């Protein structure tokens, strides 16, 4: 996330951290979008959603389900999940920001998009439901 600090300054916004998570059985999948500087606490995430213990999903599942690799998870992978197998979960603090900074699905290109456009235009287009938690 240190590289993201330079990107934040250049684009005048805050980069998000997007994590691809799954339950122990690898039957429930989550794309968790949180603030770049926040540590991830799996126990708190699980409790907020009322789900069993979660951990990082394996790289091969990330590649097959989101069509991206470790370090490049992005909300835009919702486009390649037409069956909505991945639950989209936002940290409520992300939604307080005017702009949403994220990867395009690679580790070299980043985007600055109005947060409202992600929440109210893009995600409804993908037909994904959105959960918002205090993380």
Image: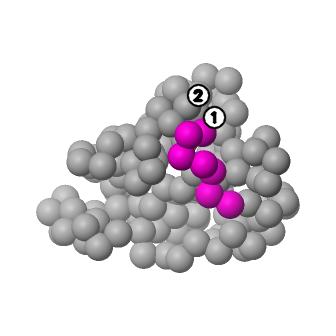
Q: Is residue 13 left or right of residue 87?
A: left
- The local secondary structure at tag 1 comes to loop
Report the magenta residues as a range: 55-61
User: Toward which corner of the image does residue 54 lie, by quadrant?
Assistant: bottom right
Q: Looking at the figure, which quarter contains the N terminus?
A: bottom left
Task: Residue at 30%, 49% (x, y): give it.
Answer: 107
The residue under label 1 is: 128
Q: How many residues crowd mark 2 within 10 Å: few (<14), some (14–19), many (20+)?
A: some
Would residue 20 be seen by someone viewing this image from the given angle?
A: yes
Which class describes the residues within 10 Å of circle 1: few (<14), some (14-19), or many (20+)?
some
Q: Quadrant of residue 132?
A: bottom right
* Residue drawn at the location 63% of the way across and 51% of the way down: 57
Q: Position of residue 33 (x, y in %)?
A: 53, 57
Task: Identify the residue at image location x=33%, y=55%.
Answer: 101
- Counting every numbered tag in the picture gives 2
Relative side of 121 to 2, left or right: right
Task: Looking at the image, tell me whether mark 1 or mark 2 is earlier in sequence order.
Answer: 2
Residue 83 is drawn in which quadrant?
top right
Q: In front here: 104 or 101? A: 104
Determine whether 135 is above or below 98 in the image. Answer: below
Give the residue number, with chain letter if any, for mark 2. Answer: 81
| Residue 121 seen by the camera | no
**Does the magenta run of residues contain 70?**
no
Q: Residue at x 69, y 45 (%)?
A: 29
Q: Are marks 1 and 2 in contact (CB under 8 Å)?
A: yes
Identify the disc placed on residue 36.
Answer: none
Residue located farthest toward the left when viewing the structure as drawn: 10
* Quadrant containing the C terminus in the rendered view: bottom right
């Amino acid at each position: 996330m240190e590289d993201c600090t330079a990107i934040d300054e250049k684009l005048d916004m805050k980069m998000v951290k997007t994590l691809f998570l799954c339950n122990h059985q690898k039957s429930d999948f989550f794309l968790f979008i949180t603030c770049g500087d926040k540590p991830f606490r799996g126990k708190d995430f699980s409790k907020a959603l009322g789900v069993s213990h979660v951990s990082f999903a394996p790289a091969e599942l990330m590649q097959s389900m989101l069509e991206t690799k470790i370090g490049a998870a992005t909300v835009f992978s919702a486009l390649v999940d037409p069956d909505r197998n991945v639950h989209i979960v936002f940290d409520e603090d992300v939604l307080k920001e005017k702009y949403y900074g994220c990867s395009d699905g690679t580790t070299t290109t980043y985007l600055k998009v109005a947060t409202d456009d992600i929440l109210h235009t893009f995600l409804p287009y993908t037909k994904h439901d959105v959960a918002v938690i205090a993380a």
